[in-house]
Image (cartoon, rainbow, N blue to C red):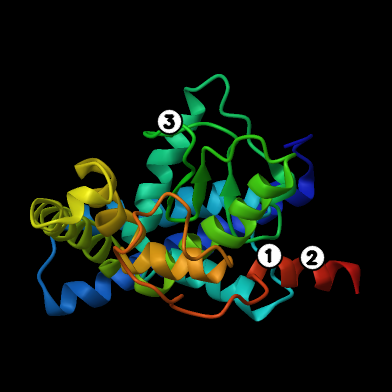
Amino acid sequence: MGSIDGARLGEAGAVAAFGGLLAWGAAATVDRIVDLDGWVLVACAAVGVANGAISGIRRIYPWTRPDGFAAAVLDSTWALPMTAAALFAHAVAAVTRTADYLPDLSERRSGHVYRRGFQPRKGFAITLGNVISGAGEVERPSRRHLILEHEYIHVWQARWLGPVYPVIYVGWSALAALYGVGRWASGARRRGKVGKVVETYAYYCNPIEWWAYSRDGRWRPRHMVDGCGWKQAAVRPLPSVTARADADRRA
């Protein structure tokens, strides 16, 4: 991260205060509809402050662009539950000696990237809120593409969908896994092992992953079982948010 100069400390303090106020306001709004305990409001504000302090000192938000301001607002309001999950990823990275934070893929890109850190499945990157872990050997063009064109899509999906994001992801995975077992038992066993069929439906065909793989131009992934799952991409590949940021910096 380099030396912590006055500018970084100033941004950290400002974004922490901004995030804390937004989070408190968001929780107070919910409190008017559903009576919340006082500690819940304090916890929400703490998440906003913590995310703001970390994100500010690492300067992830590109304040000169509308999407940078939107990212900061969403992280402390609608997407606050996912931001809390991101703090868990930060905590794991903090106690992982080889986590290796990557400023080049984080600063002014609206997200945090760790080479390792929280990584439940070897070889797979994972995104929790605005934190990407398990980036791996990003010096390889294919891996860098994965982070910038796929995992950063998950960062923004978490912001757009907020608390609905984990419901869709986990709910689909559970139901589709059962469907995959049924498909395998009814004839798909000829196309692959039960684990591969289940993975095709539960992971690759998950609407959130389908969107991200389509967005990064890699639909259909080669690990999918032939004849199973979506045939067409969900969306056309488009320049990513991070690619636009690069263009803006070069302009």
Helix or strand or loop: what does disc 3 sit on?
Answer: helix
Determine which quarter of the picture holds residue 21: bottom left
Q: CA distance from mark 3 to mark 2?
A: 29 Å
Work out which quarter of the rendered image holds the N terminus and state it: top right
Helix or strand or loop: what does disc 2 sit on?
Answer: helix
Q: Closer to the camera: disc 1 or disc 3?
A: 1
Q: Residue at label 2?
A: 246
- Tag count in the figure? 3
- Is there any visible trace of residue 58 in the rendered image? no
State yes or no: discs 1 and 2 in contact (Cβ < 8 Å).
yes
Q: Residue at label 1?
A: 242
Is residue 232 or residue 249 the one in the foreground?
Answer: 232
The spot of residue 207 in percent (x, y) is 33, 69
Q: Is residue 205 left or right of residue 75?
A: left
Q: Is residue 18 left or right of residue 40?
A: right
Q: CA distance from mark 1 to mark 2?
A: 6 Å
Q: Earlier in the sequence, mark 1 or mark 3?
A: 3
Determine which quarter of the picture holds residue 210: bottom left
In the figure, 126 relative to 119: above or below?
below
Q: Residue at x 69, y 47 (%)?
A: 9
Q: Residue at label 3?
A: 92
Q: Residue at x 37, y 33 (%)?
A: 120
Is residue 56 or residue 177 the one in the foreground?
Answer: 177
Residue furthest out toward the front: 190
Q: Amino acid at mark 2?
A: Asp
Helix or strand or loop: what does disc 1 sit on?
Answer: helix
Q: Earlier in the sequence, mark 3 or mark 2?
A: 3
Q: Closer to the camera: disc 3 or disc 2?
A: 2
